[in-house]
């Protein structure tokens, strides 16, 4: 079985940077199966990177290595790290990019990448994606134990993600975290939050509604449960409550953006 | 030889969706050769997807599996299907996405995907690309017979594509179907239409002209047969008459868009 | 070890063209490892293609084949070529696309591609990327000697790239060549130019400053050596002097674009 290396960055696709990073992975792991997650994250947006990783990683076969480079802070005191979590390995800067992975896997093991013997022959001071992270990801994919990259450390950087809050009698609120390419709103309500709210209405999906910018919409199972052009809320494929407009763009229709408050109301 | 899985969708590239779908293919077919056809189709545009498939599929080695997901209508009555046609396999929603493949291969065999044993362990109600279509495509790539996915059916959805029409004495008309990234106009005239019109002028390419928005242009063999900035018509690589401006963007120069009528006139 | 084929083009990603070209590589080399360098180059921009190749190629393992198609001039007298240089192979049009590779490897060997037995069964007059260049790249990746493609020739097309010039006492000038997706300015100053200027100040990086549109900035080692929002100059990962704004977009902040003059001043 070929080792999988999945790549995530904010490098964009109009330059050669992603290609060079992949070349460097292949120089270390000629047989690797390379898969792009996304490279058009907003520049330096570590939270967007953390959300994309959270959404994607469980779809990959066990053992996959995730090479994620967003805002590595080359030349600063920022650590480079490799993480073992949930049967996967993650390689990238220690800047919070792995916050949501760490939150889901409290038994994660983080190592600082310090073993310069693993790096590209010549390490630039601007492109550690190619010169440091890619060769390390390639070696891990080839079977190198994570202990080889450098010493274990206990305090990887973690950012706090907005969480759902009770804001009244049977009303909860959480912000939009991300508007996807279809215009769907990914919210901070987790599947667990929704399950807990639903439990209070006997598990009946009709027992709750979702409100965004004064628009009240039903909580449904699939987009097709409402007519084209109608808004709805549902559990998205990434494990969070999403707000959508069937065959439309909820972000535009509802005037919503990251930060817009979303409310769940128990009837 | 590694099995090829070629992917087409309207998922865009700024989100993790294509990456997650690929991860799910690899979970079923670790050795698959993954190839992107395009993921930036206009959202829900089944016709654009059908045209892209038509243009691309014959370039692939026999046996390739095409995983195509545009407007799957999750939660609706829309069927999921697998198709054997022309020595290839196609997996996706039964919504007309395979219309042009079916038209070229009348002996195609379609099966409804109903065998839940093939699906991802947990099937979401929003992302069948990852949870249903990808695992099935992976299994087919690994050699599973298409009969395993579910029962054969006889009436896959097919949309009617605009066709060339005679509109006067020695004049034929058909609309622009697609404007590509270079600004070239892909028309509904097929290579067969053009051959048939040319036959009436003794096969002489100088015996016909093409007219778009009152601009008359020659029918040539290659872009370089006209000067830079000049319009021309030619047989495009996808098997349809195309209108181009040499080193320019015909769509912008001629003010043309999908639906704009194009005429071929025999002199 | 699987043969690597790295792809570069101006085809964009909204059409099926890159996918079809990859399919044609796989038809010749089923086991190839396909890697995208970039496909969103400005249409017909051969210089942008040459710069992207220059930046990317050394990251790849020896033996990699680069399939680069920008402005092939199908139907014109333009030659198709295959090049051996620096332990790599390059396939594409003879239009200057390999100028910077040729400049770095004076012992390169160029062959015109004339052996029609290697081409796709049916060669279109618009898409030699799929029908000529891809099958040849695939065969080379499979181990075919470059001598098989056609006769050697001695005069591949080379364009002259702007070079740094002394413009006064201890002042050198060269233009911006490219603004990358982060807004960084890639200049025509090479690492060698900078080393030579630095030698005159005893190798002290503080002995020089860089000036763009009247803004004076330090020459540093890494972006993080200046505060967020501050401009700096440094040696970029592609081997050229770059101008950046830490966590900002230098192109926008400084009002610079390709052609904008950049000066290095020895203090």
Image (cartoon, coloured by chain):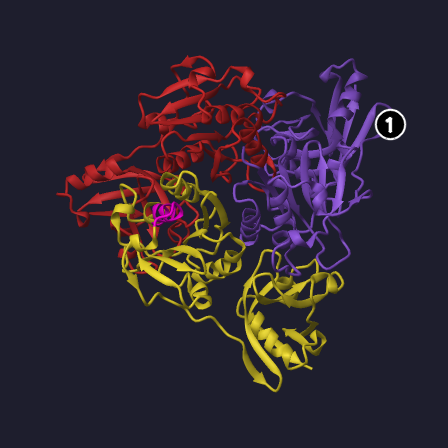
Chain colours: A purple, B red, C yellow
Q: Quadrant of residue A73?
A: bottom right
The magenta-colored residue range is C133-144
Q: Is residue A52 visible?
A: yes
Would you call the spot at circle 1 few (<14 residues within 10 Å), some (14-19), or many (20 or more)?
few
Q: Is residue B267 above or below residue C256?
A: above
Residue B126 point in image, percent of width and height: 60, 25
Residue A25 point in image, percent of width and height: 57, 47
Report the residue at 66% width, 38% height from top.
A52
Residue A251 point in image, percent of width and height: 65, 37
Left or right: residue C172 versus residue C143 is right
Of B8 and A135, which appears nearest the observer?
Answer: A135
Q: Is residue C259 above or below residue A156?
A: below
Q: Is residue A214 visible?
A: no
Left or right: residue A218 versus residue B261 is right
Q: Main secondary structure of the magenta part?
A: helix
Of B229 and C237, which appears nearest the observer?
Answer: C237
Q: Is residue C28 above or below residue B206?
A: above
Left or right: residue A48 versus residue A138 is right
Report the residue at 76% width, 32% height from top.
A105
Residue C258 point in image, percent of width and height: 53, 66
Of A70 and A219, which appears nearest the observer?
Answer: A70
The subunit carrying tag 1 is A
Of A105 and B127, which appears nearest the observer?
Answer: A105
Q: Quadrant of residue A165?
A: top right
Q: Secondary structure at mark 1?
A: strand
Left or right: residue A70 versus residue B43 is right
Q: Which residue is mark 1?
A: A168
For the C terminus of chain C, the quadrant is: bottom right
- Which residue is situated farthest in the bottom direction here? C169
Report the residue at 52% width, 15% height from top.
B115
């Amino acid at each position: 079985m070929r080792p999988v290396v999945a790549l995530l960055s904010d490098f964009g696709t109009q330059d050669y940077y992603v290609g060079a990073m992949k070349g460097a992975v292949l120089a270390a792991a000629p047989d690797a199966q390379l898969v792009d997650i996304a490279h058009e994250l907003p520049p330096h947006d570590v939270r967007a990177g953390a959300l994309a990783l959270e959404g994607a990683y469980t779809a990959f076969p066990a053992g996959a290595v995730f090479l994620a480079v967003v805002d590595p802070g080359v030349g600063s005191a920022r650590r480079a790290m490799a993480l073992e979590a949930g049967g996967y390995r993650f390689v990238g800067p220690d800047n919070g990019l792995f916050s949501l992975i760490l939150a889901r896997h409290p038994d994660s093991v983080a190592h600082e990448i310090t073993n310069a013997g693993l790096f590209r022959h010549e390490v630039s001071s601007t492109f550690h994606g190619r010169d440091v992270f890619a060769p390390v990801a390639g070696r891990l994919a080839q079977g190198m134990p994570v202990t080889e990259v450098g010493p274990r450390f206990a305090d990887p950087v973690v950012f706090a993600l907005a969480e759902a809050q009770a804001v009244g009698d049977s009303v909860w609120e959480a912000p939009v975290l991300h508007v996807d390419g279809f215009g769907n709103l990914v919210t901070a309500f987790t599947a667990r939050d929704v399950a807990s709210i639903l439990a209070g209405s006997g598990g009946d999906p009709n027992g709750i509604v979702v409100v965004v910018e004064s628009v009240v919409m039903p909580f449904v199972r699939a987009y097709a449960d409402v007519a084209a052009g109608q808004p709805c809320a549902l559990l998205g494929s990434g494990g969070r409550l999403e707000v959508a407009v069937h065959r439309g763009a909820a972000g535009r229709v509802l005037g919503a953006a990251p930060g817009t408050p979303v409310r769940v109301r128990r009837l």
